[in-house]
């Protein structure tokens, strides 16, 4: 009974891992960082800034250990693509964490399968 339960858990974990892998976002379209939205204002000579409106600016901010931050100014047409790539990054990161957890579970199940006489197939 215990051996069949392990086999079921193992098969469920493998199926779940395979589903996660099948639904990974396009790896070529990922970006790490944060999208910042700022308002800049000219000191003088701009009617829009004089009214207090300012100019909307988007920046991709990426941190690097030991190096600080890199900020990339974006044009308005780039913002939607950058948002999509950031979302893909976080989806990929979450999926990788879940896949790692499933792989750890499979490793823990493996010694039990060997003890019951069921090795790798």
Image (cartoon, helix red, strand yellow):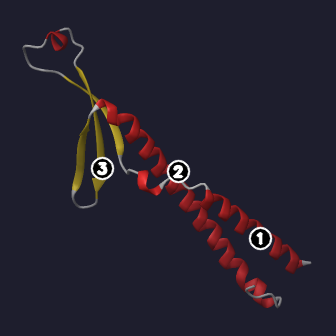
Mark 3 or mark 2, whichever is nearer to me: 2
Is residue 4 toward the left or the right of residue 70 in the image? right
Q: Disc 1 or 3, which lies upstream in sequence? A: 1
- Residue 28 percent location from the top left of the image: 42, 55
When the figure is inspected, residue 55 is found, relative to residue 61, above or below; the finding is above
Mark 1 or mark 3, whichever is nearer to me: 1
Residue at image coords 29%, 44%:
61
When the figure is inspected, residue 3 is found, relative to residue 99, above or below; the finding is below
Instruction: Say which residue label 3 marks.
Output: 62
Element class at badge 3: strand
Q: Report how far apart the C-alphas of labels 1 and 3 lie in the structure.
A: 39 Å
Q: Residues within 10 Å of mark 1 (few under 14, many from 20)?
A: few
Q: Report how far apart the C-alphas of labels 3 and 2 lie in the structure.
A: 18 Å
Instruction: Say which residue label 1 marks.
Output: 11
When the figure is inspected, residue 92 is found, relative to residue 113, above or below; the finding is above
Q: Residues within 10 Å of mark 3 (few under 14, many from 20)?
A: some
- Residue 114 percent location from the top left of the image: 76, 89
Residue at image coords 78%, 84%:
113
Kindly give the residue lying farthest to the left in the view shown.
44
Element class at badge 2: helix
Residue at image coords 71%, 82%:
110
Q: Residues within 10 Å of mark 2 (few under 14, many from 20)?
A: some
Is residue 46 toward the left or the right of residue 108 in the image? left
Q: Disc 3 or 2, which lies upstream in sequence? A: 3
- Residue 59 percent location from the top left of the image: 28, 38
- Residue 91 got which mark? 2
**Along the line of sight, which residue is nearer the eye, 66 or 72?**
72
Q: Disc 2 or 1, which lies upstream in sequence? A: 1
**Along the line of sight, which residue is nearer the eye, 60 or 108?**
60
């Amino acid at each position: 009974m215990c051996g069949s339960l392990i086999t079921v858990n193992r098969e469920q974990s493998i199926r779940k891992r395979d589903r996660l892998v099948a639904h990974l976002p396009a790896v070529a379209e990922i970006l790490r960082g944060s999208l910042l939205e700022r308002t800049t204002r000219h000191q003088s000579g701009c009617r829009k800034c004089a009214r207090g409106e300012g100019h909307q600016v988007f920046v991709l901010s990426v941190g690097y250990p030991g190096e600080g931050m890199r900020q990339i100014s974006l044009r308005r047409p780039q913002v939607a693509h950058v948002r999509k790539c950031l979302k893909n990054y976080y989806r990929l990161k979450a999926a990788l964490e879940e896949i790692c957890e499933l792989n750890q579970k499979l490793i823990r199940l493996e010694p039990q399968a060997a003890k019951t006489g069921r090795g790798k197939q």
